[in-house]
């Protein structure tokens, strides 16, 4: 293990969500000097609870991250609030990370776990209800709204698939055609599943006592529902990676762009640039919290292995030089 100065670390982890903290915890337990730079804006911040995480079901995402930060710090890792805006590859192969407040830190390796931004359809009021009763993932929220009237907003190619999927949790599904043109095949499938179709454009939400009660339609009518399913666009937070020449790749479904992600090795999270790994939603937009954490662990193991190999080569070269080989 190399000793770190106040401004130099074995590994800088950019992003302090489940993926970043799981990676940082693995690395500090491997006796690496680790800095986590965290902007404090996790993707799941609007959600009061997370589900499907064995042993953590129903827990607050904020509580999980607070405990994760404490665990990393307990092993000697450092957490700094702030935003990493760019990074430079230095001649010796290390990295200089530049932060929004003008400070810089140096890292031998980078693990980027900055996640993504959910870009919601352009319907007034969606943002205020996002993660509460405006939803997209039935595995995260379906149980909580089971058997209730659920509306699916057709704003892209995933709408019919979403209606089909959410039908598992409730028989009371309505597809709001909104601005999307349904095909004859779409209509046949929806009819077979007893999914109602409302043809008018959605103009807003109906909320009473801080609870979604329906959506407003063009002309003023209200379609009742207690949950509204949308398909956000998944945009990778890739600023640091882009500054290193690692581009985003467009994710498509049914010929339509639904988001961006950064390519990496599916087993290790290694990117095309040696010394840089990624984990979580920045490289796997559809991954849930448990999977993102698992990716962070796998990437951290790969980072530590790479550092060990570099240190071994350096020791062998020094040994041979000393022995006159």
Image (tube, rainbow, N blue to C red):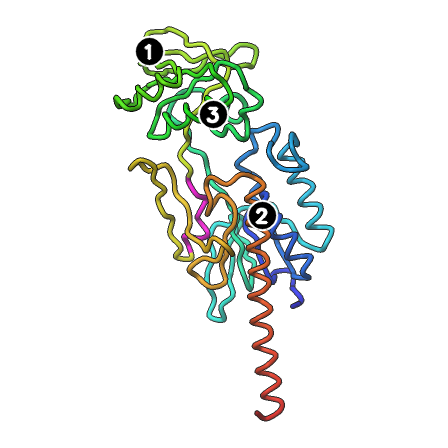
Of labels 3 and 2, earlier in sequence is: 3
Write down the region rendered in magenta.
Answer: 235-243
* Residue drawn at the location 68% of the way across and 50% of the way down: 72
Q: Would you name the residue on which mark 2 appears?
A: 294
Residue 6 in the figure: left or right of residue 274? right
Quarter holding residue 109: bottom right
Q: CA distance from mark 1 to mark 2?
A: 45 Å
SS state under label 1: loop
Task: Locate residue 280, reporting x and y percent.
Answer: 52, 46
Q: Would you name the residue on which mark 3 appears?
A: 127
Viewer-proximal residue among 257 and 113: 257
Residue 267 seen from this side: yes
Viewer-proximal residue among 108 and 160: 160
Q: Is residue 278 above or below residue 218?
A: below
Task: Locate residue 259, reporting x and y percent.
Answer: 38, 39
- Front label number (1 vs 2): 2
Mark 1 crowdedness (10 Å alpha carbons): few <14, some 14-19, many ≥20: few
Task: Locate residue 150, reporting x and y percent.
Answer: 47, 17
Q: Would you name the residue on which mark 1 appears?
A: 218
């Amino acid at each position: 293990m190399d000793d770190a100065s106040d401004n130099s670390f074995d590994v800088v982890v950019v992003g302090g969500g489940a993926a970043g903290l799981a990676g940082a915890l693995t690395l500090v337990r491997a006796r690496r000097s680790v800095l986590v730079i965290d902007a404090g804006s996790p993707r799941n911040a609007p959600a009061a609870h997370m589900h499907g995480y064995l042993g953590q079901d129903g827990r607050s995402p904020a509580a999980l991250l607070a405990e994760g930060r404490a665990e990393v710090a307990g092993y000697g890792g450092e957490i700094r609030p702030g935003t990493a805006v760019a990074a430079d590859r230095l001649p010796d192969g290390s990295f200089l990370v530049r932060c929004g407040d003008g400070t810089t830190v140096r890292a031998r390796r980078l693990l980027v776990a900055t996640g993504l931004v959910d870009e919601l359809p352009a319907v007034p009021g969606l943002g205020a209800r996002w993660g509460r009763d405006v939803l997209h993932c039935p595995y995260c929220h379906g149980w909580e709204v089971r058997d209730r009237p659920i509306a699916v907003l057709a704003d892209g190619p995933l709408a019919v698939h979403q209606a089909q999927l959410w039908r598992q949790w409730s028989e009371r599904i309505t597809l709001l055609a909104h601005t999307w043109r349904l095909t004859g095949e779409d209509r046949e499938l929806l009819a077979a599943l007893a999914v109602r179709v409302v043809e008018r454009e959605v103009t807003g939400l109906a909320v009473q006592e801080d609870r979604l009660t329906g959506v407003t339609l063009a002309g003023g009518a209200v379609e009742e529902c207690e949950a509204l399913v949308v398909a956000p666009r998944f945009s990778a937070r890739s600023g640091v990676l882009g500054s290193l020449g690692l581009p985003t790749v467009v994710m498509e479904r049914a010929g339509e762009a639904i988001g961006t992600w950064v390519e990496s090795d599916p087993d290790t999270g290694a990117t095309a640039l040696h010394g840089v790994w990624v984990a979580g939603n920045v490289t796997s937009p559809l991954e849930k919290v448990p999977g993102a954490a698992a990716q962070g662990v796998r990437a951290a193991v790969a980072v530590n292995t790479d550092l060990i190999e570099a240190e071994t080569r350096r020791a062998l070269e020094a040994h041979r030089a000393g022995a006159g080989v």
